Image (tube, rainbow, N blue to C red):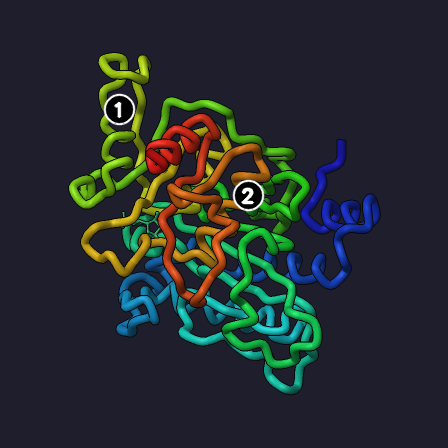
Amino acid sequence: MSRITLSRFLIEQQRRDGTLPADLRLLIETVARACKAINFSVNKGALAGVLGEAGTGNVQGEAQKKLDVIANDVLLDANEWGGSPAAMASEEMELPYHIPGEYPKGEYLLLFDPLDGSSNIDVNISVGTIFSVLRCPAGVSHPSEADFLQPGTTQVAMPYTLYGPQTMLVLTFGNGVHGFTLDREFGSFVLTHPDMRVPESTKEFAINMSNMRHWEAPVQRYVNELLAGTDGPRGKDFNMRWVASMVAEVHRILTRGGIFMYPRDARDPAKPGKLRLMYEGNPMAWIIEQAGGMATNGYQRIMEIQPSKLHERVAVFPGSREEVEIVTGYHAK
Ligand code: P6P
């Protein structure tokens, strides 16, 4: 059977059920092409002098890696002229990026974390790029931050790319999850993982255990029961992973199940979590739900949270349904 490239998949999706507008298809193709450019820089690493700190900080108060800035610039340059986005927003920029006057504006708001997990880049561990696509409110020609503040249930497309042993792009438009592997010789993303599904149950969990003393009691209870294994109420042993790259963790869950947790931390009651709702929590919650999993903040569906700020943070518990139901149930007690 001939290989199905991303372009062919998108054209056949558009032809099949007419739910994929041409300008949204173009946006995803442009995003995929830009991620190949990011992949090239990530793969070159020290050979291109792109490792290490950029010497600048972002709106999150985090030191930026050179590749954070490079990836952000690649995405702005690739998407500003295409005519699909009305504006863009990034973890690396405080305010929305407006399309320069010489280019047409489209119907979509493109949000992204240009290089998620970038603390791994200098030690050659997987990193990724996360996208969330929203519709620009009708009649808005100059989108403000307020126009981006839509709940995750309004997303219209979500790809992520994972720069790991293979470079993969995984996406959903709301009708299933499909994974593509980059053929580096040919230069195309090829469909290799159609209809990805999260197994209902699992024996694997992911959390940064060094923060345990700062978690809320329901999370401490849940994780202690996982650690107790066959000696505790769960009656089975569990395994733990922590890659410090959400894209890699979510990809593992889509491939073999599990639960990824970044809970609220008592050290900063003003912050409901570390991860960002608009371009980490929402897109990853959607793709996990689309693959049959579940994603809450411990109390409610992540995608039903009404955002109040562009860089708002959120606690996240995405993963295999059985586990997310248990840990969310403990928060309700
Ligand atoms: P910690 C990367 O910085 C990130 O936003 C996620 O990709 C990752 O899961 C998490 O933070 C890692 O956090 O506190 O373990 O470094």
Q: Which mark is residue 121?
A: none
The residue type indicated by label 2 comes to Ile
Circle 1 SS class: helix
Report how far apart the C-alphas of labels 2 and 1 lie in the structure: 27 Å
38 vs 142, nearest the viewer: 142
Q: Is mark 1 within 8 Å of ligand 1?
A: no
SS for tag 2? Answer: helix
Please state if 25 lies on the left or on the right of 130 as rendered.
right
Quadrant into which the N terminus falls: top right
310 is higher (above) or lower (below) than 274? below
| Residue at the spot of label 1 | 225
Left or right, residue 86 beside residue 66? right
Location of mark 2 (residue): 287
Residue lying at the far bottom of the rendered structure: 101
The one of 1 and 236 positioned closer to us in this rendering? 236
Q: Position of residue 126 (x, y in %)?
A: 38, 46
Q: Residues within 10 Å of mark 2 (few under 14, many from 20)?
A: many
Image position, residue 84 (x, y; %): 68, 68
